[in-house]
Amino acid sequence: MLRLLVIDDHAMVREGLLQILRKLGPNVVQYEAQDAESALLLLETEKDFDLVLLDIMLPGTNGLPLLGILRKRFPAIPVVVLSALDDVDTVNRAMRLGAAGYVTKSGDGETLLEALRRVLAGELYLPAHLQDRLAVGLGGGRGTADRFGLTDGQRRVVELLREGKSNRDIGELLGLTEGTVKVHVSKIFRKLGVVSRAEAIALLQRQRSRI
């Protein structure tokens, strides 16, 4: 059974999402919340959610602070942002707060399904047009990823490594186990051609200074 929580204040949007989410498989169960309070109550009482789909334009509160709360209180549950906003600053902030994916409401149902499938498989997801725009906001993070052949998931780990985060911190922010983070870090070291965290950070800083 796949348990999904949709947090959106528009009932028609939630109903439309239900039709799309059913295509993920026959055993999808969708829970709904129209605001932060009801969402947190559901997460506390129902437990065992597989994914949260979050609109960051909620009434009475900005969804970005709610995203931060979700990542701290329920770090094992990936959160995909579904929003009408696609400006660099908003997308950048959402991903840094720990979103596992970001999809715009202007996209189609197949784009959303692809995002959810990839996130449920343990990957990070951004549509191509947001990847290009986010690369500008991150000061060339996409260029570093392309240069060393990093996956989207590894790129996100690299950004947090560059900020000096520990494996435990990275795991909590991305909703990964510490063991999974260690695997990512080992693969990143091999692709960067380094043998230590300090060497990796130094290399990443040099790459950023060249942008």
Image (spheres, rainbow, N blue to C red):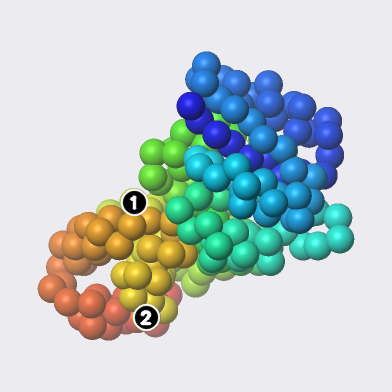
> Label 2 belongs to which residue?
164
Q: Amino acid at mark 1?
A: Thr
Can you say whether 65 is above or below 77 in the image?
below
Quarter of the image with the C terminus in it: bottom left
Between 162 and 167, the residue placed more toward the observer is 167
Q: Residue at x 27, y 83 (%)?
A: 202
The percent position of residue 191, horizontal first and vertical second, equals 20, 60
Within-10-Å neighbours for mark 2: few <14, some 14–19, many 20+:
some
- Answer left or right for 122 relative to 125: left
- Answer left or right for 142 relative to 137: left
The percent position of residue 113, horizontal first and vertical second, equals 55, 30
- Looking at marks 2 and 1 on the same chain, the residue that comes earlier in the sequence is marked by 1
How far apart are labels 2 and 1 at the CA level?
20 Å
> Label 1 belongs to which residue?
151
The percent position of residue 188, horizontal first and vertical second, equals 24, 62
Q: Residue at x 50, y 30 (%)?
A: 2
